[in-house]
Image (cartoon, coloured by chain):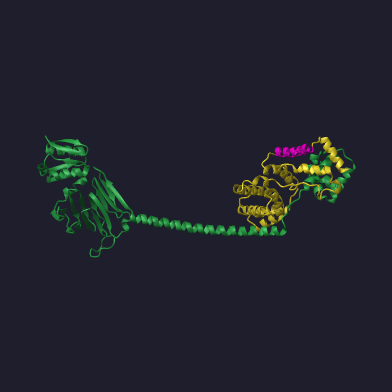
Chain colours: A yellow, B green
Amino acid sequence: MKANPGNNQFWSRLLQGDRQALNEIYRLHADALFRYGIRLLHDENAVQDCIHDLFLKIWSNHARLSDTDNVRYYLISSLRNTIINYRNQQGKIEHQELQERDGFAMDFTVESQYILKEEQTEKAQRLAEAMNQLTARQKEIIYLRYFEELSYDQIAEMMDLSKKGTYKLSARALEALREILQVEKAVLIALLVSLKH
Amino acid sequence: MVKNHESTMPNSNYNNFNSEDFLADADFLRYVKKANQQDVQFWESWLKDEPDNKAAFLQARLQLQIILSSKDRVISATQADALLDRINQSIDGLVHKRRLRIRRMIWSSGIAASLLLVLFGVWFFNSTVHINTTFGESKLVLLPDGSEVRMNANSSLSYPRAFKWTKNRMVLLTGEAFFKVKHFNQNPSAVKNGELFIAQSNKLKVEVLGTVFNLKSRPNVNEVTLIKGKVRVKAIASGEARILKPGEMARLGTDSRFMVNVTTTVPQTSWIGNKILMTQTRVGDIIAEFENLYGYKVILPDTTMADKKIDGTISTLNRESMLFVLKNILNVNERREGKTIYLERR
């Protein structure tokens, strides 16, 4: 779906030690990597450091890397590992602050370019608030699925979940929504329908 | 437009979709995300027919709209460029560092190798080879220059490991040994490095160019017997030096002076054949030789017995048979206390 013909060509050139190809890959993916990284790490400089380390590592290992048909997925999952390692290292130094900062930053609101003024009702507001209470992990899955448009297989692999677990998680996410709104599914649907009209 | 959709997703039947199906649909996602004119037109016309699952569609759309409301923090173009520059600089540094590392590795391995060589040299030129024989044991030693040394029992020989690189070929001996020294000298009036061979004991020093001789350095006797060639013997204590001719034996007296006698050289070298040849030989000297070879202390019943002189041959090959022969010649019985043998008159 996101197949970019130039994408893989750069990757195979990189595997042969082409510095220019590494630069092209960076230019294609830097935005996405930063967007994702900042949600995980909440610190611009730290995210930039991690992206720096990631590309340095890719360059050092270019002879040993294998071909991939999805460079974006490779980069995002590698950045995730880099950030986890970075956090573990930082964790040794400042352990106490870690818990609150660890979450995946994702705040939902009805005041969005995607939602028309007349749709910004109190009900939509409650739905957004409910979604804000999803766990960090659930938010990350939603982000990877709808923003980065990774497949469930890829998300499961990079987050170390069974594929079934991923489905379960997003089903549970929806379930959690219903619980938070404290309404039956039928009522919820009716509610959503009434929102439109 | 619709046709386009049908060509990309021929099997999709949106009328049967629930909200989760919509949320999993790539085209639906693109519609909410990008709101392309084509997509908007398609879904508006689909909604116009009032499908049964309209509510599911609306729920899915609202949910997706709320999901997408989460704002991204983006990296500015200048920041992204600066980061790329930093990455490239680090890679340059990496390449440079690797080159440095390789160069340093070559250097350090070279240093390590030469250090090893120096250490080996220091060891080689400072260490000494020690060879010992125990009681009743004999050994033939081949020196690095090709000279041969036959060591008698209870003796020790040592020489520098760098024997061929030293100024003189020098060996130290305690006990008794028979030397066959390789001859290298061409001009006796101009002796070059490595041509002189020196055999030294604690009392005697024997300087040779290439000869066959026997050096004996025991507690009871210090003597040099020349079989072939020419040697210069020196007493270390008095400094007295004598030149020996073949068939001469120099024995050191208690006054550290030499007594030189002419000999057949046979008695002095008979030990090589594990024999003692006795021609008017003092009993005390034979007993002393037994002590030298086997490490026992032998006590005679009286001093007159030590001065008795005997003739004949005794085998030294075996301690007990040698002792048996001695006992019969002297007509004595033995009594042992550890390493001491008391001989008593029968």
Given residues B279 and B284, the one toward you in this image is: B284
Tell me where residue B133 appears, x and y as whole percent.
26, 45
Name the residue rendered at 61%, 58% in the picture. Answer: B90
Considering only vertical position in the picture, is B124 above or below A183?
A: below
Q: Is residue B1 left or right of residue B208?
A: right
- In reply to whether residue A116 is colored magenta, the answer given is no
Q: Is residue B305 left or right of residue A34?
A: left
Which of B105 and B237 lies nearest the eye of the viewer?
B237
Name the dominant secondary structure of the magenta segment.
helix
Regarding residue B214, the answer to whether it shows in the image is yes
Please report the residue visible at 73 percent of the width from the left and 52 percent of the height from the top.
B73
Identify whether B346 is placed above or below A85. above
Q: Classify residue B235 by image quadrant.
A: bottom left
Q: Hey, which quadrant is residue B16 in on the image?
A: top right
Q: Position of residue A68 (x, y in %)?
A: 67, 48
The answer to whether residue B15 is seen in the rendering is no
x and y, in percent, of residue A79 in the image:
66, 49
Which residue shows up at 23% across the image and 54% down it?
Answer: B200
Farthest residue, direction bottom: B190
Percent of width and height locating residue A123: 83, 42
Residue range corresponding to the magenta coloring:
A163-181
Say how many tags the image has: 0
Magenta region includes residue A179: yes
Relative to A14, B58 lies left or right = right
Residue most toward the front?
A: A96
